[in-house]
Amino acid sequence: MEIRFVYMTAGNMDEASRIAKTLVQQRLAACVNIIDGMRSVYEWKGTLQEEREVVMIAKTRADCLPDLVEAVKGMHSYDCPCIVGLDVLDGNNAFLDWIRAQVGPASVADNEWHAKQD
């Protein structure tokens, strides 16, 4: 099971918070960081835009990424939301194991991970 960080943007904090909570509650992400105050400059339909946005970074497994993308698209206000999966190559194995245990159906692996932490 490969780990992915998913970079996304939202139009405001309320939307980002709603998306983040839903992803975690549905076990599509172990955690979602929300970073407010980003400014984006881009061209959309022939017009230069400059907007305030909110960044979200979700931690998930590669096998859950397609469902995460569809869930975000269904909740998002944008016509074409930014949702990009990035490979995680290495890191703190305990943290990566926690992501594996938290994402997807609750399982024996989840219980085993929590038991190791006690």
Image (cartoon, grey):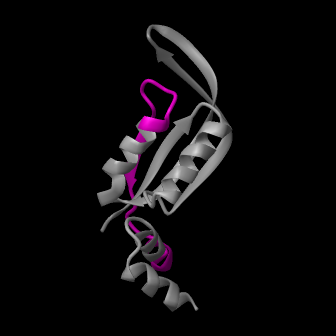
Position in image of residue 104 (x %, y %)? 38, 65
Residue that appears at 41% across and 69% down:
90
- At 57% from the left and 52% from the top, the residue drawn is 21
The residues colored magenta run 74-96
Residue 13 left/right relative to 1: right
Residue 28 is situated, as x and y percent measured from the top left of the image, at 43, 57
- Count of numbered circles on the image: 0
Residue found 43% across the figure and 74% down from its top: 101
Residue placed furthest toward the top: 46
Residue closer to the observer: 116 or 86: 116
Residue at image point 40% right, 61% down:
88
Residue 15 higher or lower than 68, as above or below: above
Residue 92 painted magenta: yes
Q: Nearer the viewer, residue 22 or 79?
A: 22
Q: Quadrant of the N terminus?
A: bottom left
Across and down, in percent, residue 40 comes to 59, 27
Q: Is residue 54 left or right of residue 95?
A: right
Find residue 25 and report its horizontal and vertical position in percent: 52, 58
Q: The C terminus lies in which quarter of the figure?
A: bottom right
Q: Kindly indicate the quadrant of the structure image that contains residue 74.
A: top left
Residue nearest the observer in this picture, 67 or 47: 67
Q: Does 54 lie within the magenta span?
A: no
Q: Is residue 59 above or below residue 43?
A: below
In this picture, residue 49 sits left or right of residue 106: right
Q: Quadrant of residue 103?
A: bottom left
